[in-house]
Image (cartoon, rainbow, N blue to C red):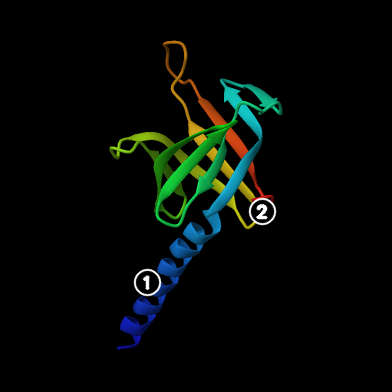
């Protein structure tokens, strides 16, 4: 009996963590900077004007806005630390590992394919986003 109660409490705790992440990710986020890594070489890009404003909505829709143009997609928190961006037909077009998420900051890591052929290559991108308070 005691084991069942502990297990039920643990499952409830995990469910609360997942829903807290979904609640925290909701809202408008703008990219502050992007760090790119490729086989030992890293570069931080701070001129991120071409990056869209991301609006994660309660109904699972993702609105990407750049200038006067907006496009709608879908998003999903598939686990505690994975954020998926999907096309309207449900196909995944971006997969991120959540490195940090709180009320003011979202840090996403995206694994990328190597540019050149060969073994032992590592390429990824880390996006630093800040909550847009103006909306």
Residue farthest to the bottom, as pictured: 1
- Depicted 116 relative to depicted 65: above or below: above
- Depicted 86 relative to depicted 22: above or below: above
- Depicted 34 relative to depicted 99: above or below: above
- Image depth: mark 2 or mark 1 in front: 2
- Point 51% across, 61% down: residue: 23
52 or 36: nearer the viewer: 52
- Point 70% across, 26% down: residue: 47
Disc 2 crowd, CA 10 A, few/some/many (<14, 14-19, 20+): few
Number of numbered discs on residues? 2
Q: Measured from the top left, where is residue 16 in percent x and y?
A: 45, 69
- Point 59% across, 36% down: residue: 127
- Depicted 104 relative to depicted 97: above or below: below
Q: Measured from the top left, where is residue 95 in percent x and y?
A: 42, 38
Left or right: where does residue 43 sit relative to residue 63? right
Q: Is mark 1 on a helix, strand or loop?
A: helix
Distance in Å between CA atoms under marks 2 and 1? 27 Å
Q: Is mark 2 on a helix, strand or loop?
A: loop
Left or right: where does residue 23 sit relative to residue 67? left
Q: Measured from the top left, where is residue 87 in percent x and y?
A: 35, 36
33 or 122: nearer the viewer: 33
Q: Residue 97 carries which label?
A: none
Left or right: where does residue 113 sit relative to residue 135? left
Which quarter shows the N terminus? bottom left
Disc 1 crowd, CA 10 A, few/some/many (<14, 14-19, 20+): few
Q: Measured from the top left, where is residue 46 in percent x and y?
A: 71, 29
Q: Residue 11 carries which label?
A: 1
- Disc 2 target residue: 104
């Amino acid at each position: 009996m005691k084991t069942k109660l502990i297990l039920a409490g643990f499952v409830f705790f995990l469910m609360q963590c997942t829903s807290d992440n979904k609640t925290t990710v909701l809202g408008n986020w703008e990219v502050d900077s992007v760090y790119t890594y490729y086989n030992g070489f890293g570069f931080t890009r701070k001129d991120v004007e071409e990056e869209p404003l991301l609006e994660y909505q309660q109904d699972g829709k993702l609105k990407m806005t750049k200038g006067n143009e907006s496009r709608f997609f879908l998003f999903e928190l598939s686990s505690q630390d994975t954020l998926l961006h999907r096309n309207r037909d449900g196909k995944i077009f971006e997969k991120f590992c959540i490195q940090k998420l709180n009320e003011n900051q979202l840090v996403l890591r995206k694994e990328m394919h190597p540019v050149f052929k060969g073994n032992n290559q590592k390429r990824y991108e880390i996006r630093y986003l800040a909550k847009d308070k103006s909306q």
